[in-house]
């Protein structure tokens, strides 16, 4: 039994070593195959009887030992769609089942898995590796950035153009000077009349029932107030005022200066800055070039109103316009002139006007200049900082809220006929974007806007988390897919398939699909592939060992055969 057992054992040894030689041959043959995982050989003893008294030879058996979880070397390539996994995880790929009538592939339902990431776009835009497997991923909504993680789809890069996007927001940044020189003025250069005043004289003093009508402000939006003088000495018989007229009580026994002082107090309460001359008793209501004042007095007292003009003052300083660009719905570019003017006598007040010489722009509303007032110093009560926007058109905004002006660009009948654009100057109370600090000229910085012309595909980026972003020559960027990684409880339990791919088995466990870089998965490396994890030197060493073991087993067979021949001769 021992000699026949020796023969059997040696034969199983030959068989096991030949299997090992096949695995070594496969490994060496695929040493340059992207993502290939070597197969080692594991040997196990076959026993019949083996105890303290006797040992009957049984032999040996072998089975493959997979290294699907062993990392290969990451090698850089020049193809931006090549992907390598640095760490744990496999790509999900699809196999083509057929081709439809549009010459597009129809895929098998169940995905396969691979580390061969030498993907390139085919003629239909699908990412395919050298074995013909199509890369799967998650779709990403380019507008919202939301990833649809509930289903895998074949990644197809067929959106190779970018539609135009009309401008809806301009983010304007510039510094306006607090004390610019008149040399910067591109507007009127002649001096303009100074602040208007209205002087009232009265001889004899006021009479009960006299009235005075005062108009303050520009002709486009004046404010008119009527005052009725009431002599307190007349008691119940004194004049009264019917709203909106304002009652001004005075004492007819007082001097003219005292009577005018009583009037001045009431005027000041109602927003009309006035003063009284102690020597003449004349009442002066102050105006300005921005807010001229006129007045008319009536009654039998002989009171008169005389309008006088102060000394000439420098005009407002209008700066050269800065141009900003916008795009319409068709992707055509248009320019808008932004013209800043510092209001004379108020170094913290500017107006800004929007206009255009573009032949396709009929008008821009609002047509009237927008008044912007800035903070000259920090305001501890509100937290507003010096140099920041305080108010727009007289309305102060809350701190850290957007300081914006709504514009409408009218295209004069072409479609679309109008386009809303928000002109953003920063935030109220925050010294950023549009500021007011020292300087001699408007220091324009930038005016980026969110519109785009039509664009064509330029290239793509794939980050470490698998997000695929398409870049277009108009500056647009669209993230359309994310490449996830698939992990298993037992990678070495996967079933090898043709083309360096694997399918799931009971031994591998259920696939877990996760974004790259999360939950134990590796990161993706773009423009790279993972090489084979075969070590040629180690394979040559195993090759020599296998060869010697095979020779030794064959020697056992030869020797056992000689022993059997001797036994036969003894019988003869």
Image (cartoon, rainbow, N blue to C red):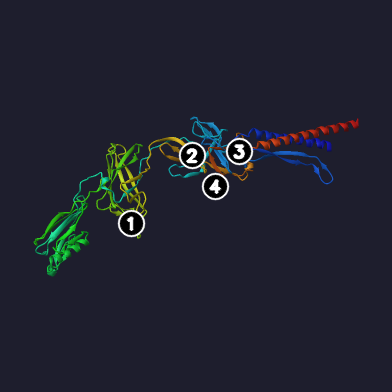
Label 3 near label 1: C-beta < 8 Å? no
Is disc 4 surrounded by few (<14), some (14 to 19) or many (20+) residues within 10 Å?
Answer: few
Q: Which residue is mark 3?
A: 502
Tell us which disc is closer to us: 2 or 4.
Answer: 2
| Front of the two marks 1 and 3 | 1
Of badges 1 and 2, the one in the foreground is 1
Mark 3 and mark 2: Cα distance apart in space: 28 Å
* Mark sitting earlier along the chain (3/2): 2
Question: Dot 2: what SS?
Answer: strand
Q: Secondary structure at mark 3?
A: strand
Quarter of the C terminus within the rendering: top right
- Is label 3 in contact with label 2 (beta carbons under 8 Å)? no
How many labels were placed on the picture?
4
- In three-dimensional space, the C-alpha distance between marks 1 and 2, rounded to whole angstroms, equals 47 Å
Mark 3 or mark 4, earlier in chain: 3
Describe residue 31's horizontal placement relative to residue 125 as left or right: right
According to the picture, the residue beneath numbered tag 1 turns out to be: 377
- Using the numbered discs, state the Cα–Cα distance from disc 3 to disc 4 in whole angstroms: 22 Å
Residue of label 4: 518
Depth check, mark 3 against mark 4: the one in front is 4
Q: Quadrant of residue 267?
A: bottom left
Task: Let me know if residue 566 appears in the view.
Answer: yes
Residue linked to disc 2: 461
Give the alpha-carbon distance from disc 4 to disc 1, as whole Å: 50 Å
Decide: marks 1, 2 in contact (CB < 8 A)? no
- Label 1: few (<14), some or many (≥20) within 10 Å? few
């Amino acid at each position: 039994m021992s000699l026949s057992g020796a023969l059997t054992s040696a034969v199983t040894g030959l068989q096991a070593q030949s299997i090992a030689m096949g695995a070594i041959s496969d490994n060496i043959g695929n040493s340059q195959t992207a993502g290939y995982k070597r197969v080692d050989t594991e040997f196990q003893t076959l026993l019949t009887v083996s105890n303290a008294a006797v040992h009957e030879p049984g032999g040996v058996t072998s089975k493959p030992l997979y290294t699907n979880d062993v990392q290969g070397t990451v090698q850089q390539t020049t193809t931006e769609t090549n992907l390598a996994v640095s760490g744990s995880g496999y790509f999900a790929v699809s196999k083509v089942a057929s081709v439809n009538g549009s010459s597009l592939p129809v895929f098998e339902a169940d995905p396969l898995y691979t580390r061969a990431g030498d993907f390139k776009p085919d003629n239909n835009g699908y990412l395919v590796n050298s074995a013909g497997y199509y890369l799967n991923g998650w779709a990403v909504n380019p507008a919202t950035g939301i990833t649809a993680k509930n289903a895998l789809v074949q990644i197809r890069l067929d959106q190779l153009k970018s539609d135009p996007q009309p401008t809806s927001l301009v983010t304007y940044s510039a510094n306006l000077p607090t004390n610019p020189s008149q040399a910067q003025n591109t507007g009127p250069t002649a001096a303009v009349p100074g602040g208007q005043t209205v002087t009232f004289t009265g001889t004899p003093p006021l009479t009960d029932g006299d009235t005075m009508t005062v108009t303050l402000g520009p002709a486009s939006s004046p404010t008119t107030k009527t005052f009725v003088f009431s002599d307190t000495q007349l008691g119940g018989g004194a004049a009264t005022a019917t709203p909106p007229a304002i009652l001004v009580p005075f004492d007819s026994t007082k001097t003219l200066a005292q009577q005018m002082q009583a009037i001045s107090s009431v005027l000041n309460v109602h927003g009309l800055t006035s003063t009284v001359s102690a020597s003449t008793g004349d009442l002066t209501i102050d105006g300005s070039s921005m807010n001229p004042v006129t007045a008319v007095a009536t009654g039998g007292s002989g009171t008169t109103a005389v309008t006088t003009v102060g000394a000439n003052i420098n005009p407002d300083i209008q700066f050269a316009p800065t141009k900003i660009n916008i795009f319409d719905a068709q992707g055509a570019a248009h320019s808008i002139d932004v013209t800043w003017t510092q209001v004379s006598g108020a170094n913290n007040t500017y107006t800004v006007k929007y206009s255009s010489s573009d032949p396709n722009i009929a008008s821009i509303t609002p047509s009237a200049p927008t008044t912007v007032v800035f903070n000259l110093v920090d305001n501890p009560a509100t937290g507003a900082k010096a140099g920041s926007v305080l108010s727009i058109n007289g309305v102060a905004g809350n701190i850290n809220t957007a300081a914006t002006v709504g514009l409408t660009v009218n295209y004069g009948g072409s479609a679309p006929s109008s386009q809303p654009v928000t002109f953003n100057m920063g935030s109220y109370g925050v010294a950023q974007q549009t500021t007011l600090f020292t300087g001699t000229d408007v220091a324009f910085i930038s005016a980026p806007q969110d519109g785009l012309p039509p664009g064509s595909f330029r290239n793509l980026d794939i980050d470490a988390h698998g997000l695929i972003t398409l870049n277009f020559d108009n500056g647009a960027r669209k993230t359309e897919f994310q490449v996830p990684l698939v992990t298993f409880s037992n990678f070495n339990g996967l079933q090898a398939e043709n083309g360096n791919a694997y399918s799931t088995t009971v031994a591998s466990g259920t696939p877990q699909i996760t974004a790259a870089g999360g939950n134990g998965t590796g990161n993706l490396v773009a423009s790279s592939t993972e090489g084979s994890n075969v070590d040629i030197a180690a394979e040559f060493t195993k090759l020599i060992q296998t060869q010697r073991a095979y020779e030794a087993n064959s020697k056992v067979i030869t020797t056992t055969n000689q022993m059997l021949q001797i036994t036969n001769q003894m019988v003869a």
